[in-house]
Amino acid sequence: MRAVIATIETLSLWAGRVAAILLTPLVLAMVYEVLSRYLFDAPTQWAFELSYMMMGTIFLLGLAYALRNDAHVKVDFIHARLPRRAIAVIDLVGYVALITLLGWLTYALFKDVLRVHRTGEGTGLSAWNPPLWPYFSVAVAGFALFTLQVAARILRNVAVLLGREIPPPGHHPGEIAEGAGTV
């Protein structure tokens, strides 16, 4: 179980790193667009489409990374008062519901990728009109990675219920984990 979780969390880590790298070309494209539009009165046809696709990619790849690092916004005043096993049960129920929805969403998006690839559909938002299938493929990959990370969270919660808690990513042996001993 540890090896499966470690593999999934490594994929999520690398997805987050790719998302972080994409911030630089996004910023460069936006600066170029602003300079062309306002200094030279020559707006580009591609900047808007490229920027929303890159920003969407950053968010989609960042989903799994944020869950891996426990960085999603959450209300944890209840978690702070409950024992670790009770938290694991609550989280397990939520993650099982979420993985069901994510599995369905990933499958539906995959069908859309096949459809837009077959039809050659473009965005239709500018004269550039790039094909949609690469962006839809990123959406499938992002949600698939998020689904895998939710599966890793399910496995972590099962491990807690079985009394075999797995340390979070970045934990080094010998350190006392936050909340340790609150089972």
Image (cartoon, rainbow, N blue to C red):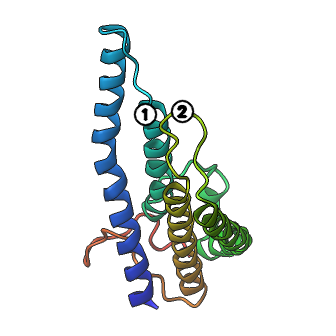
Along the viewing direction, whichever of 77 and 157 lies nearer the viewer = 157
Any part of residue 95 in sight: no
Task: List x then y, in percent, for residue 105.
Answer: 69, 66
25 up-or-down from 2: above or below: above
Q: Earlier in the sequence, mark 1 or mark 2?
A: 1
Choose top left, top right, bottom left or bottom right for residue 43. top left
SS of the residue at dot 1?
loop
Residue denoted by label 2: 126
Along the viewing direction, whichever of 97 and 32 lies nearer the viewer = 32
- Image point (65%, 64%), residue name: 109
User: How many numbered marks does the figure carry?
Assistant: 2
What amino acid does circle 2 point to? Ser
Q: Which mark is residue 28?
A: none
Task: List x then y, in percent, for residue 94.
Answer: 71, 68
Q: Are marks 1 and 2 in contact (CB under 8 Å)?
A: yes
Residue denoted by label 1: 46
Choose top left, top right, bottom left or bottom right for residue 17. bottom left
- Image point (55%, 83%), residue name: 155
Q: Is residue 92 left or right of residue 55?
A: right
- Image point (72%, 74%), residue name: 100
66 up-or-down from 125: above or below: below
**Figure quadrant of the C terminus:** bottom right
Q: Is residue 100 left or right of residue 167?
A: right
Q: Is residue 163 left or right of residue 109?
A: left
66 up-or-down from 159: above or below: above
Crowding near the residue tagged with mark 2, few <14, some 14–19, many ≥20 C-alpha atoms within 10 Å: some
40 up-or-down from 156: above or below: above
Task: List x then y, in percent, for residue 139.
Answer: 55, 59
SS of the residue at dot 2?
loop
Q: CA distance from mark 1 to mark 2?
A: 7 Å
Any part of residue 131 in sight: yes
Q: Is residue 87 left or right of residue 60?
A: right
